[in-house]
Amino acid sequence: MPYFTTSDNCKIYYEESGTGEHIVFIHGWTATAAFFKSQTDYFSNKYHVIAYDARGHGRSDRGEITERNMRLSRLAEDLHELIESLGLNKVNLVGWSMGTSTLLAYVRAFGCQYVNKICLIDMTPKVVSDNEWKLGTLDAKQTIDFLALAVQDWDLASDFFLPLALVNGFPKDSERYRLALAEMRSNTPHAMIYFYIAIASEDFRPVLKDITVPVLLTYSGNGLLCGPAHGEYMAQNIKNSKLVVFPDCGHGLFMDDPVKFNTELETFLTEL
């Protein structure tokens, strides 16, 4: 299995397939590269596709190095170093949830160096709602309560969080739900808690104006975490962006409707 080693000596697992223009897929919190299987299978016929497990997730390093660097700025550095280690240029970057946060941290640190186009999937630039910001996913008390639950019982916290990441009414007795729950529970709890804190502590609203490449915004129409209002805010604050709402999909819209997502992304990538 291919790995690359970061500048702080963390081993990052990645997969690559196909040839042509580059696409890198960046997964969300508690997920892995495997969540993008419908995309990597489809796009590898025409593109050079890379998907990787973020540090602390999946097959990537969960050791002492990782425990000292659980922050979004480090995830952005990992992405930058992966791009450089593979010698990529004019890369198309696709980030879901925490992957979107990683991309915004990347823009904050490196601008749009090496970037051709960006696709952001169902994420808010500021996760915690407050008196003046109503487009978060949880308020401060809810965030603390969830973190307390995760510290006490990771399996129970997984049971609570996972339905929020799926389309409203998704059947819990389905095979996909069972597989997703098993994947989430398999993570190292303290690593997930640290990364959740890292996500919740960020405010990327000032970064949106610094995105200088075309952006595809894909947002759920029937989700419990984000929705059309989040996408509209992003579209209003990111120049040269296009918003597509997926009416009957949840947070994982690229899995809920892979045909529509792949079509929209391919159309966006081929536009001049």
Image (cartoon, grey):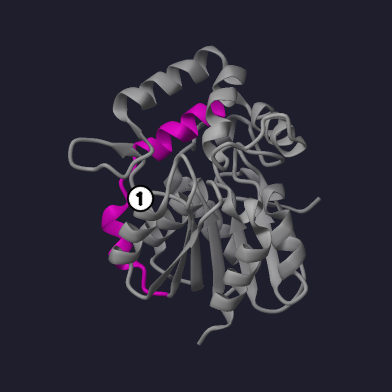
> SS class of the residue under badge 1?
loop
Q: Residues within 10 Å of mark 1 (few under 14, many from 20)?
A: many
Q: Is residue 155 left or right of residue 143?
A: right
Percent x, y of residue 142: 36, 25
Q: Residue at x 66, y 26 (%)?
A: 185
User: Residues in magenta?
Assistant: 190-213
The residue that mark 1 highlights is 125
Residue 158 vs 15, above or below: the answer is above
Residue 108 position within the rendered picture, expressed as x and y whole percent measured from the top left:
35, 58
Q: Residue 208, image x and y in percent?
A: 32, 61
Q: Is residue 241 magenta?
A: no
Give the camera-side residue of 22 and 244.
Answer: 244
From the image, give the main secondary structure of the stretch colored magenta.
Answer: helix
Residue 194, magenta (yes or no): yes
Q: Quadrant of residue 154?
A: top right
Residue lying at 62% horizontally and 37% vertically, measured from the top left = 170
Amino acid bearing label 1: Pro
198 on left or right of 42: left
Would residue 263 appear left or right of 80 to someone viewing this image? right
